[in-house]
Image: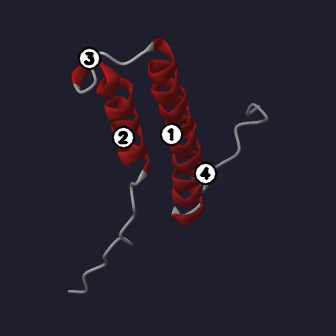
Amino acid sequence: MERTEKPKQNQTAVWYFIGAVFIFTAPNLLFDGLDGWGRALFFAVGIVVMVAGFVQMRREVLANRRAAPPQVPPQGPSRSRPDR
């Protein structure tokens, strides 16, 4: 019996989103007395990391679609014309 293994797929997009969550929460958890400009800077960096995560997720989804075998419709009698 031959064992077929699926290719290992990297899922790095999730780490971008986890990083973005940490960046969004860092000013409140670690830097209590941070000014508004500092919080805005953390927010901007979090948005950039989140957008990078969406770009990476799109790459992964497209790579998974290309790696999957094509969907072939079942071959059977054509139902386009009714029988007489």
Q: Earlier in the sequence, mark 1 or mark 4?
A: 1
Residue on which the image places disc 2:
19
Kind of element beneath mark 1: helix
Disc number for residue 77: none
Q: Quadrant of the C terminus?
A: top right
**Nearest the eye: 26 or 58:** 26
27 on left or right of 77: left
32 shown above or below 1 = above
Q: Nearer the viewer, mark 3 or mark 2?
A: 3
Q: CA distance from mark 4 to mark 2?
A: 42 Å
Q: Nearer the viewer, mark 4 or mark 3?
A: 3
CB-based contact (under 8 Å), mark 1 and mark 2: yes
Disc number for residue 49: 1
Residue type at mark 2: give it.
Answer: Gly
**Badge 1 density bin: few <14, some 14–19, many ≥20, Cα 10 Å:** many
Q: CA distance from mark 1 to mark 4?
A: 40 Å
